Image (tube, rainbow, N blue to C red):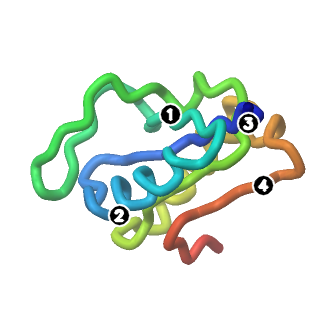
Amino acid sequence: MAAEFPVVFALYPRVTQLDFTGPHEVVARLPGAQCVLASASGGDIEADGGVVFTRVGRLADIERCALICVPVPALVPSKRWRIRNSLLRSGALRRVRAMSLLFALARWR
């Protein structure tokens, strides 16, 4: 049996749906992966094309993760910092083993 591997997908309003669901489909098939959707405010997130993701958790409520995936092609710097700050406030970044972070398709600076 594979060890537990919690993965957080940090979403935001008007995320490009394919930039999120493509990586999600791949990561969800990893042995032990437990994918969690989260955003700054939680609730429903409407993607750029109108698809709505419901029951999205809040980033501040994330207790631990092994991997963080942020679909960012359309992400502006202010939103990057808002996601980063939400993760820091929640303490999730301090609990990531060896600070293993993945910012999918990111130009994270």
- Whether residue 37 is situated above or below residue 12 in the rendered picture: above
- Dividing the picture into quadrants, the one containing residue 33 is top right
Would you name the residue on which mark 4 appears?
100
Would you name the residue on which mark 2 appears?
19
Gap between marks 2 and 4 measured at Cα? 20 Å
> Going 20% across and 43% down the picture, which residue do you hit?
46
Q: Do the residues labelled 4 and 3 touch (CB within 8 Å)?
A: no
Between marks 4 and 3 in the image, the one whose residue lies nearer the viewer: 3
Circle 3 SS class: loop
- First along the sequence among labels 2 and 4: 2
As rendered, which of 103 and 1 lies closer to the eye? 1
- Whether residue 11 is situated above or below residue 16 in the rendered picture: above
Going by the numbered disc 3, the residue's amino acid type is Ala
- First along the sequence among labels 2 and 3: 3
Circle 1 SS class: strand
Q: Do the residues labelled 3 and 1 touch (CB within 8 Å)?
A: no
Going by the numbered disc 1, the residue's amino acid type is Val
Would you name the residue on which mark 3 appears?
2
Label 1 neighbourhood size at 10 Å, few (<14), some (14-19), many (20+)? some
Q: Can residue 9 be seen in this view?
A: yes
Residue 50 x/y as whole percent:
10, 49
Circle 4 SS class: loop
- First along the sequence among labels 3 and 1: 3
Going by the numbered disc 4, the residue's amino acid type is Ser
- First along the sequence among labels 1 and 4: 1
Gap between marks 2 and 1 measured at Cα? 16 Å
